[in-house]
Image (cartoon, helix red, strand yellow):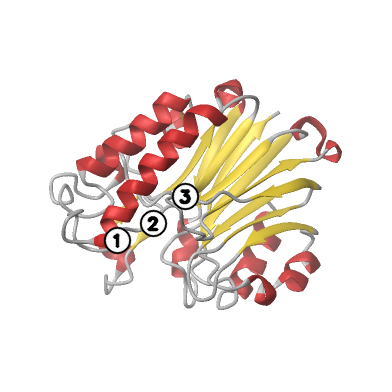
Amino acid sequence: MRFTVTTWNINSVRLRIDQVLRFLAEEQPDVLCLQETKCPDDAFPLKALRGSGYEHVVFAGQKGYNGVAILSRHPLLGRDVMAFCERADARHISAVLGPEAGKAAGLVLHDFYVPAGGDVPDVGLNPKFAHKIDFLDALRAWGGRRVSGPAILVGDLNVAPLEHDVWSHKQLLDVVSHTPVETERLETLRGEAGWIDAARLLTPEPEKIYTWWSYRSPDWAAANKGRRLDHAWVSPDLAGTVRGVSVARHARGWERPSDHVPVTLALDL
């Protein structure tokens, strides 16, 4: 059974609902996990998404920022939202695939949106960066207790952890998302909990992988100064089922795009 999960920081689901519907129609993943939906729950475009064939939807939103959602072609059991750093930010949601999902039944899906951290990589000078580091520490404390049984963790983790996850390792060492204080934390929490980085399982370094290109670049495609901020991790018992991780780079060229593109994990269950 081929099973696919896509993660995508959509940067406003209402603004880019046509792009979401286009992607679902063209690619038809089993599950789509969105981040930065930027709308409260009562404004979430549920009808349009269900009308596209994804009848099973769970979401947690906030007005104007954050927000996460899971859309599924298969029934979902429950909805769990965790708060980190004593903040009620909508940065996590999880659900379990129901028995109608065949061999994927019982699979736990986690969708995360880690704080971006602002522009200054100094916890003393930048409260946003301090919050990001606190969030990563809290995620580390959570992660080691949660990988038990088949599970997938996806999302915009806002860290490019490896040397070839950025266009220039040397030039970005003091740039938020690739600083050692961030990259070491992310890799430590992943390793301690046993999560497998699916993209790098099949495409090891030194091959470059990017999932994000800045709006600040006047010609993002030609410059190609990307970073791998969007991740798909699997529990150890799923490592042998990973068959691909694809990056929909072409979506960055759509009209009024998100600066992130969809990343799809494919498993043979």
For disc 2, the neighbor class at 10 Å (few under 14, some 14 to 19, many from 20) is: many
Amino acid at the residue labelled 1: Lys
Q: Mark 1 and mark 2: span between their CA atoms?
A: 8 Å
Please state if 147 lies on the left or on the right of 189 as rendered: right
Local secondary structure at mark 1: helix
Please state if 255 lies on the left or on the right of 212 as rendered: right
Q: Mark 3 and mark 1: span between their CA atoms?
A: 14 Å
Local secondary structure at mark 3: loop
**Mark 2 and mark 1 in contact (Cβ < 8 Å)?**
yes
What residue is at 28 percent from the left and 43 percent from the top?
182
| Upstream in sequence: badge 3 or badge 2 | 3
Q: Residue 43 placed where, x, y %?
A: 66, 77
Q: Residue furthest front?
A: 86
Q: Residue 166 placed where, x, y %?
A: 27, 48
In the picture, the quarter occupied by the N terminus is: top right
Q: Mark 3 and mark 2: span between their CA atoms?
A: 11 Å
Q: Nearer the viewer, mark 3 or mark 1?
A: 3
Above or below — where is 249 with respect to 185?
A: below
Q: Which residue is mark 3?
A: 84
Q: Nearer the viewer, mark 3 or mark 2?
A: 3
Q: Which residue is mark 1?
A: 128
Looking at this view, is 21 or 185 the one in front? 185
| Upstream in sequence: badge 1 or badge 2 | 2
Mark drawn on residue 115: 2
**Mark 2 and mark 3 in contact (Cβ < 8 Å)?**
no
